[in-house]
Amino acid sequence: MPSLDWIGKASILNHHNEIPYRLVECNEVVGDLNAGNLIVKGDNLHALKALLPYYKGKVKLIYIDPPYNTGNEGWVYNDAVNSPEIKEWLGRAVGQEAEDLCRHDKWLNMIYPRLKLLKEFLSEDGSIWISIDDNEVHHLRTLMDEIFGVKRFIACNVWQKRYSRENREAIGDVHEYIVVYAMNPTLFKQKRNRIPFDEKQAKVYKNLNNDPKGRWRGIPMTAQAGHATAEQFYEIISPAGKVFRPSEGRCWSLSKATYEKFLSEGKIYFGKDGKSQPNVIRYLSEVQGVVPWTWWPHEEVGHTDEASKELLSIFAGTSGFNTTPKPTRLIRRILQIASNPGDIIMDSFAGSGTTAHAILAQNNEDNGQRKFVLVEMEDYARDITAERVKRVMQGYGSTLGIGGGFRYCELGESIKDENGALNPEVSAEVLAKHLFFSEYGVPLETKPTLPYIGSFNESGLYLFFDTFERKKLAKLLKDSNESRIVYAASCTIDPQKLKDAGITFRQLPFEIKDR
Ligand SMILES: C[S@@+](CC[C@H](N)C(=O)[O-])C[C@H]1O[C@@H](n2cnc3c(N)ncnc32)[C@H](O)[C@@H]1O
């Protein structure tokens, strides 16, 4: 398979593994504490690593809208990668091609470790959706093929971001892309939802006869006779006594038995006067919507102007957000296709918080209880990202709030300091969760009751902050007979005895694994 090479690639391949686990400090709550939503301020490389022990394999949908690398964004490539060519760039804004010949290399170095981490969050039926434009789409697709695998590619959707002509370029730029990969494409196809009808598509559904079951349309009851069975040729007598037979080369689309069932259920329509060709009644309420396709016109999902106005209306005319946000309708379309009530959704380039807004709006419509995890590194994470979400929840101007809540968090210190010592700020519960994740690679689902942390695949995990000695061993052996991993500051038990008892001892903090 062809692969992409760029300056710095060799240094970046394992960079995500070198990022230390840091604490996520959640000291502020807005609204309902138990809503399960999170907004984290911080560089997403660190934030994602810090969130991994809690969300690995649990996220159904990731939507990201990273810097497009247009040359005008002024984004800074600042990851602490230990290689001379990357150190040379650090902290310098990524500029126009002529000023900075490495701008595509930098972008690739920035996005690669983040995509590697994001992949870890996805559930087996999860998918990732990435907004991008022509500056990097070709690189992104090749990179995604490398990281996720070609077979996981689902679609490259085209979003019509403008509704008027763009006259500055030789050929006006009117679209962007939303690239989609799914962890399991077969499962994704089975489980993805159809797009609900909008009023334009639903217009053909009327209620000509005041049917109590609501709006419906008549579907002609004939079909090509090519593969018809004998059951599809019969005579139909309408309520007004008119006799119908399929014309030459045609058959009825329903077998006689099904036709009679439908007739008795009032699902066949012969026109107002009972003299017309039979039509099968399809109710709007029974139709699941249309299969998504790659063309996303602005009439259906909004445009950039709409998105800017949306944000301005929330902030009463001055948002202070200098990047163009996405329209809420666009993200809602993604949510409708690839998420269901109760799912966890992540956006690690959150910007003005459109993803959270869209989730709240979608939940409000289908009582969905979807949860969000947002990461934004700029200082406006509080004043714009979190503030927007708060206003949507609590109301703004004449718009009523739709309720909900979130925790606002910042990134704290690393679990271990640069000398390998345990950070005193780390609570016992956070450490326990971290140990569980680093041992078993899956998040701990229950609250630890120390010294017992939890079990996985018939292996129990324990944490003692002091010495692991005889009495503790005796108690452990009494409690259960599964194999155990014990973390403690020291151990006074003979190694052979530990082995006989099926216990693996790991010394704090030196033997904490960085997964
Ligand atoms: C294009 S904007 C996203 C806009 C968003 N979709 C909206 O509708 O408002 C990209 C955002 O990613 C943020 N960002 C860029 N690099 C980041 C990083 N390493 N960690 C976290 N956020 C980052 C930028 O600060 C910016 O707010």
Image: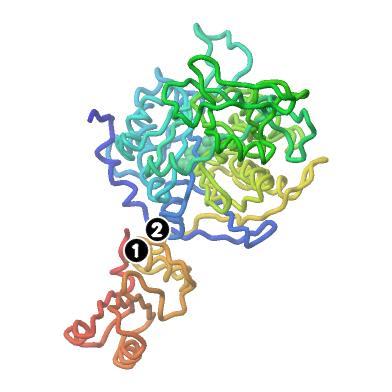
Q: Nearer the viewer, mark 2 or mark 1?
A: 1
Q: Contact (CB < 8 A) between labels 2 and 1? A: yes
Image position, residue 268 (x, y; %): 66, 32
- 258 with respect to 137 (left or right): right
| Residue in view at x 39 percent, y 80 percent | 465
Amino acid type, residue under disc 1 in the picture: Ser
Q: Which mark is residue 329?
A: none
Q: Residues within 10 Å of mark 1 (few under 14, many from 20)?
A: some
- 248 with respect to 116 (left or right): right
Quarter of the picture containing the C terminus is bottom left
Nearest the camera: 344 or 453?
344
Q: Which mark is residue 21?
A: 2
| Residue in view at x 65 percent, y 59 percent | 29
Disc 1, SS: helix
Q: Which residue is mark 1?
A: 438
Amino acid type, residue under disc 2 in the picture: Tyr
Nearest the camera: 191 or 281?
281
Image position, residue 141 (x, y; %): 36, 30
Nearest the camera: 471 or 97?
471
Depicted 118 relative to depicted 162: above or below = below
Nearest the camera: 61 or 27?
61
Mark 1 Cβ inside 8 Å of ligand 1: no
